[in-house]
Image: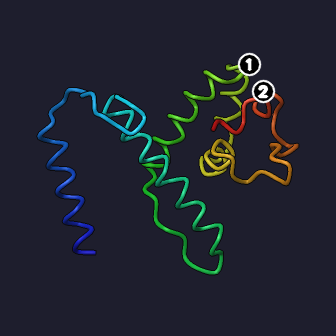
Amino acid sequence: MARLDEANAEAQEHLGRLGAFDRVVSTQRGPMLLSDFLDTRLIELVVHAGDLAASLPAHHPPTVLPTASRRVALVMRELLTEKAAQPVEALAAASTMAVARFIALAAGRDLPAGDLPPADLPAALTSALPLF
C-alpha cells in the first residue's frame, strides 16, 4: 500500500506540473488530448475491476471510487449519444440504470450468449450497446 500511495503522489505531482492546460500526448494509436487519454485509462480500470469482481464472486470486490465510476459512466453516455440512433431515448434509458450495470453493458459485459443486449433493455439502448 505504501508503494501505491507513493505512485499516486508521483502521478498527482506530475499532473500538477502539467498545469491546467489539456496537452496533446503521443499514444500507440496516435496523438490525443491528455484528458481523453486519462479517461481511457480510467475506463480500463473500472471495467476490469468489474471483470475481476465477477470472476471471483467469493472474494471482496476491488474498491472503485464512486467518482471514478461516475466519470466512466459520463464518458460512456457521451459515446452513447454519438452512437445511438435515438440519442435522447438512449440517454434517458441509460440514466435510469445503476451505474455499474450501464458500464458493464456499455463495455460488452453482462451480455447473454450471442452478444445481444438483455431483453429488458429499451430498444434505443439495444441498438447501441455495446459501445466498443
Q: Position of residue 17 (x, y in %)?
A: 11, 40
Q: Whole-Å distance between the Cαs marked 2 and 1?
A: 6 Å
Q: Which mark is residue 111?
A: none
- Tell me if 15 is positioned left or right of 52 in this view: left
Q: Residue furthest bottom?
A: 58
SS for callout 1: loop
Q: Position of residue 70 (x, y in %)?
A: 49, 43
Q: Position of residue 89 (x, y in %)?
A: 73, 23
Mark 2 closeness class: few <14, some 14–19, many ≥20 residues within 10 Å: some
- Tell me if 98 is positioned left or right of 28 in this view: right
Three-letter amino acid code of the residue under disc 2: Ala
SS for callout 2: helix
Q: Residue furthest left?
A: 17
- Among numbered discs 2 and 1, the one appearing first in the sequence: 1
Q: Position of residue 18 (x, y in %)?
A: 15, 36
Q: According to the image, what is the colour scheme of the structure?
A: rainbow
Q: Which mark is residue 86?
A: 1
Mark 1 closeness class: few <14, some 14–19, many ≥20 residues within 10 Å: some
Q: Quadrant of residue 29?
A: top left
In this rendering, is residue 41 above or below 132?
Answer: below
In this rendering, is residue 71 above or below 32?
Answer: below
Of 26 and 69, nearer the camera is 26
Three-letter amino acid code of the residue under disc 1: Gln
Q: Name the quarter where the N terminus is drawn.
A: bottom left
Residue sitting at 33 percent across and 29 percent down? 33
Q: Would you say the residues marked 2 and 1 are in contact, meaning their CB atoms lie under 8 Å apart?
A: yes
Q: Number of callouts in the render?
A: 2
Please name the residue that numbered disc 2 is placed on: 124
Residue sitting at 22 percent across and 62 percent down? 7
